[in-house]
Amino acid sequence: MSHRVRTVIEALALAVLAAGLGYGATYATKHYAPFLWFVWLGSGAAIAFGLSWWKPRYWGVAAASTPSLVLIETTSRLSDAPPTAAALGLGFAMFWALTSVAGAWLGRMLAPRSQRPGAPLDATMRSDQERSGLAWQIGVWDRMSDVYLREVDRRFAPVVEQVIARARLSPGERILDLGTGTGAVAERAAQLVGPEGLVVGVDISPDMLRTARQRLAARGLTRVGLREGRAEAVPAEDEAFDVVLASLSLMYVIDRAAAARELARVLRPRGRLIAAVWAEPEACDIVLFQQTAGRFAGPPPVPGVGPGALANATPFLRRLADAGIEALVERETLGFDFESFGAAWSTLAGVTTAHLPPERQQEAQAAVMAAMYPRGDAPRHFRNTTQFIVGRRA
């Protein structure tokens, strides 16, 4: 079933439920408790609120459908009623309709923040440290967007292809690309699921999303949706996706327990998770490079994030299992080349060390040279062991 057909069916089902509950509240009050008219006046708002809180995406359907049968029945009786009674009945019905709209809107706004349209990125964060960490990461990725498109994407292409190959995407499937960056994974996924499928890319960086939007538009992939959001609070409804892809993004998640719960929430039963993360620095040159340079840039505002943060993936696999996703790790050695140390430095460390004074930058460069370029500046192949987290929701 395509996403469009499923959306129409869900909306129609909610409309029938809203209309039935609304009419049922009116009928019950009229026939069994006519003295509780004030309860009837609030029932439309209560019903619309509950449905919109449950399914905020369809709040407009709930707002319109809840009073629909009541308005139809009231209008049909106006011709037989005295003018005063008709005016009073119509007034009550219109009031009921307006309170239903208000209730639906309030339900939408009070829905779980991860599902609410336009929720701020830091809405679910528990501490100032987490907020500082998020702001720091957004700043880094915003500055990296052009470098990624120009230098990084082509070097990370083997990782993207392995993620896509392990996902085994089919036409019509609904895909979440978590940490979409410049849209490389979303582009490949959209080509495979076709026009009947759905691809949604989520990223914390507005500049990365802008770059992804331009990239996808240039390739005619205008049906890919892009949203600003975090793994800890995915801006999507429950069971919205058949597959979640996360290529080199989970290493930067601040609250991985929350992210695991969100991954399970947005996946359909038996839905698949395919993620790629770097291995330990001893087996992954890019991690050795960036961690060596990073020692001179100072620690990030939150610990435990960055390249190599999921080299030991076992704790995260336990969090996934607790959330209902059974996963394992597959390792594969991939790689890319840089023609000189300067090219590698500007691509992999230029942004994170840009704020350092010149002497500290020189110290950082000397440390990386000593660790990775013992024979001096020359072309170098980066041998990167990549870990693929492959899981399925129960």
Image: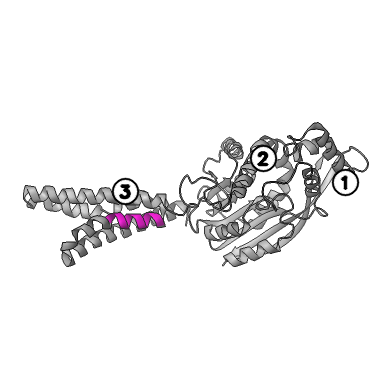
Q: Secondary structure at mark 1?
A: helix
Where are the magenta residues, as a range? 44-53
Spatial separation of the CA atoms under disc 3 and disc 1: 63 Å
Residue at image x 66%, y 36%?
143
Q: Point out the residue furthest to the right here.
A: 375
Relative image position of residue 260 (x, y in whole percent): 60, 59
Viewer-closest of 170 and 124: 124
| Residue that badge 2 annotates | 140
Q: Are marks 3 and 2 in contact (CB under 8 Å)?
A: no
Q: Residue 20's spot in the image, x, y percent?
A: 28, 60
- Could you tell me the amino acid type at mark 3? Ala
For the stretch drawn in magenta, the main secondary structure is: helix
The answer to whether residue 202 is magenta is no
**Residue under circle 1?**
371
Q: Label 2 crowding class (10 Å Cα cut-off): few <14, some 14-19, many 20+?
A: some
Quadrant the C terminus occupies:
bottom right
Q: Please tell me whether mark 2 sits on a helix, a strand or a loop.
A: helix
Spatial separation of the CA atoms under disc 2 and disc 1:
25 Å
Image location of residue 246, percent across then percent down: 63, 52
Q: Earlier in the sequence, mark 3 or mark 1?
A: 3
In the displayed structure image, the side of residue 253 where residue 120 appears, left or right:
left
Q: Quadrant of residue 224?
A: top right
Crowding at label 3, few (<14), some or many (≥20) Cα neighbours within 10 Å?
Answer: some
Q: Which residue is mark 3?
A: 102
